[in-house]
Image (cartoon, coloured by chain):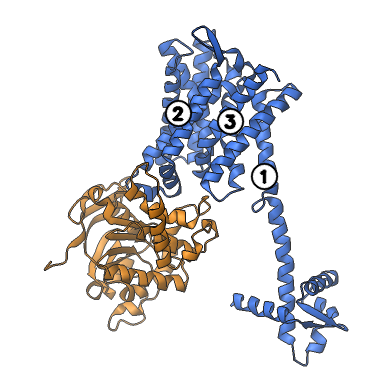
């Protein structure tokens, strides 16, 4: 109790796609109950990092532990919000059904979701302000609504740790505020959130911790300690334009990271 | 109807429904062409199985065929994973290779066995009732009806038991993996099912048309529903309709039954494609036309609102001026005004157009949405 538990510990993690390293010797320590952003340019391995932690990608080397044990034994503690674009939104199903998918892990093989799952799903939809849309076909949702459905689906997993892949990507202002409120609530309930994030300007406002990633881990720690101009420059390779260097550089960072990203595609 | 005719229709229906059920998941996983590959390469499994057990009726042939189906899928994935070959190209490489190997083996070593290439390609449903299942001396019906009912029950059971897993792995494979459901296992289970179904259907409809039975009913159903369960049910219904109408078309035209079934399934898709209530081409065209008029009426109300109560109103809000200011052809402008009047959006006072309360509200709402 005297010290914060480590929710996630990553040591010497290396991931390679056919000899080409996408993550090179990454160390990361995530204390329990914090909100951590993972930032870095396109191709930095941000998605790969969270996928490797969740065992979705086989690492070439390194150790990962969730509350001191391998992911396989701690599956039930982890909730996942994948990138919105990773699924086919024309799939024939409705909002409630998608949210209930978050309970499938608890149900295990073969057992079907029932009333209890439905109740939890409706409750989660209420939390993200989507209760009215429970019967809506998913292809009729806007981008922000899709994101909130994914969040609700992660909430019903009742996890301790949440991995979110670009939860703010292309969402409207209402959704962004809804997500932030939710993140703060999760954090207050001592849940840990690790989110891939693109907007550097909002990092100090939204997150407690940050990991600056560009294949290697440039820095990882509390925002006020590691979110410096120097580290950002090292991460984005001087492609970030700084208006002023005074004080906490973060607020003055231009969203040039995204512009620079286009060149990388 | 003779007993033989009834038996043929029963077999046709059972085959079609058995194919349509796994087909739903193939369509949702964008794997339609994989079913074409599998339905061909299972032949190699049958041939190799035949060389081993030397009995054309052995159930081991089905096992051999199912294994070959899985080998096909993994070879395609292996090629694709090298990132040197696209998935469609990989399918195009793997399946002709395995299929041609089977054809060469048949023509070289099994010429005198019942494995002729015409039957392989098109099947012959009309002969299916001649192969009877005889138990303890009494005739209990055609063998094909029993094998295909078995396949249908297998598919139904698999989908019923693993419905939740199939749905999750199809919609979001990454979440399935994170939650501990092995999407690979589900994937190969489904592919095994497709292989077994293909072997069963092979005898009756041949390898070319299996793909039509697997794909046409689900894509038709997909255009009509937003629910997976309904999509499964509708696919089965379409498959049955295609089978029975296909049989009668073949009967009247004295044509190949499997070919007629595939044609009828194509026809069903055509009708759905055109006339589906929400996603059909006709509904789409109607919606576009309606939107065109709605948009024009909104534009008219906004134009009137902009000039309402200003000195220019007398000039601007005349019917004849609309074509000039909004650059509308006079007949189109007249039609828009007429429609707007009918909907109570504008009123005509000796040549001038005035907004009604409804019209003013529409203009304001449209402007609000735009900003």
Quadrant housing the N terminus of chain A: bottom left
Judging by colour alone, the chain drawn in blue in this rendered image is B
Read off the chain for label 1: B
At 82% from the left edge and 88% from the top edge, which residue is drawn?
A: B314
Judging by colour alone, the chain drawn in orange in this rendered image is A
Do tags 1 and 3 sit on the same chain? Answer: yes
| 10 Å crowding of disc 1: few (<14), some (14-19), many (20+) | many
Q: Which residue is mark 3?
A: B16
Residue B190, image x and y in percent?
44, 35
Camera sees residue A260: no
Residue placed furthest toward the bottom? B311
| 10 Å crowding of disc 2: few (<14), some (14-19), many (20+) | many
Secondary structure at badge 3 equals helix
Label 2 vs 3, first from the N-terminus? 3
Residue B309, image x and y in percent?
75, 91
Do tags 2 and 3 sit on the same chain? Answer: yes
Query: Is residue A196 toward the left or the right of residue B262 in the image?
Result: left
Do tags 2 and 1 sit on the same chain? Answer: yes
Label 1 vs 3, first from the N-terminus? 3
Label 2 vs 1, first from the N-terminus? 2
Q: Which residue is mark 1?
A: B272
Residue placed furthest toward the front? A115
């Amino acid at each position: 109790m005297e010290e914060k538990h480590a929710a996630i510990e990553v040591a010497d993690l290396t991931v390679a796609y056919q000899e080409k390293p996408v993550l090179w010797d990454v160390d990361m320590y995530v204390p329990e109950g914090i909100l951590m952003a993972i930032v870095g340019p396109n191709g930095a391995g941000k998605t790969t990092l969270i996928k490797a932690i969740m065992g979705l990608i086989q690492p070439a080397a390194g150790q990962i532990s969730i509350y001191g044990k391998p992911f396989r034994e701690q599956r039930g503690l982890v909730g996942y919000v994948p990138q919105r674009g990773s699924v086919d939104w024309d799939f024939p199903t409705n909002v409630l059904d998608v949210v209930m998918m978050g309970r499938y892990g608890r149900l295990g093989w073969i057992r079907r979701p029932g009333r209890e799952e439905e109740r939890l799903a409706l409750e989660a939809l209420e939390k993200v302000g989507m209760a009215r849309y429970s019967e809506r076909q998913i292809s009729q949702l806007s981008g922000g609504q899709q994101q909130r459905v994914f969040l609700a689906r992660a909430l019903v997993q009742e996890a301790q740790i949440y991995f979110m892949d670009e939860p703010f990507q292309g969402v409207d202002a209402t959704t962004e505020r809804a997500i932030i409120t939710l993140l703060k609530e999760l954090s207050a309930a001592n849940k840990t959130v690790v989110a891939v994030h693109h907007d550097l300007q909002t990092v100090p406002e939204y997150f407690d911790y940050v990991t600056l990633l560009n294949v290697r881990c440039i820095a990882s720690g509390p925002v006020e300690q590691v979110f410096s101009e120097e580290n950002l420059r090292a991460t984005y390779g001087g492609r970030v334009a700084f208006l002023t260097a005074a004080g906490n550089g973060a607020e003055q960072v231009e969203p040039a990271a995204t512009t620079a990203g286009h060149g990388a595609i | 109807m003779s007993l033989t005719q009834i038996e043929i229709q029963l077999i046709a229906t059972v085959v079609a429904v058995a194919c349509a059920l796994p087909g739903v998941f193939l369509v949702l996983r964008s794997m339609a062409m994989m079913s074409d590959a599998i339905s061909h390469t299972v032949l190699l499994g049958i041939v190799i199985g035949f060389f081993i057990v030397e009995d054309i009726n052995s159930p081991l042939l089905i096992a051999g065929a199912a294994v070959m189906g899985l080998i096909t899928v993994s070879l395609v994935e292996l090629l694709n994973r090298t990132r040197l070959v696209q998935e469609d190209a990989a399918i195009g490489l793997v399946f002709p290779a395995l299929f041609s190997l089977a054809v060469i083996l048949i023509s070289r070593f099994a010429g005198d066995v019942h494995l002729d290439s015409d039957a392989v390609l098109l099947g012959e449903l009309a002969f299916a009732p001649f192969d009877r299942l005889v138990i303890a001396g009494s005739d209990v019906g055609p063998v094909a009806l029993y094998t295909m009912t078995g396949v249908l029950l297998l598919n139904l059971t698999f989908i019923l038991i693993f419905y939740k897993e199939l749905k999750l792995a199809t919609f979001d494979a990454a979440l399935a993996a994170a939650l501990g459901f092995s999407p690979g296992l589900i994937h190969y289970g489904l592919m095994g099912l497709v292989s077994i179904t293909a072997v069963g259907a092979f005898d009756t409809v041949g390898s070319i048309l299996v793909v039509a039975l697997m794909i046409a009913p689900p894509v038709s159903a997909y255009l009509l529903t937003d629910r997976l369960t309904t999509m499964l049910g509708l696919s089965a219904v379409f498959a049955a309709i295609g089978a029975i109408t296909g049989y009668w078309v073949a009967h009247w035209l004295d044509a190949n039954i499997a070919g007629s079934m595939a044609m009828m399934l194509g026809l069903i898709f055509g009708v759905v494609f055109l006339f589906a209530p929400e996603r059909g081409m006709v509904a789409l065209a109607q919606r576009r036309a309606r939107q065109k008029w709605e948009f024009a009426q909104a534009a008219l109300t906004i134009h009137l609102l902009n000039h309402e109560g200003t000195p220019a109103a007398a000039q601007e809000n005349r019917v004849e001026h609309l074509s000039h200011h909004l650059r509308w052809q006079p007949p189109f402008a007249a039609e828009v005004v007429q429609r707007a009047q009918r909907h109570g959006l504008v009123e005509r006072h000796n040549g001038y157009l005035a907004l009604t309360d409804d019209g003013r509200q529409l203009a304001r709402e449209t402007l609000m949405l735009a900003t």
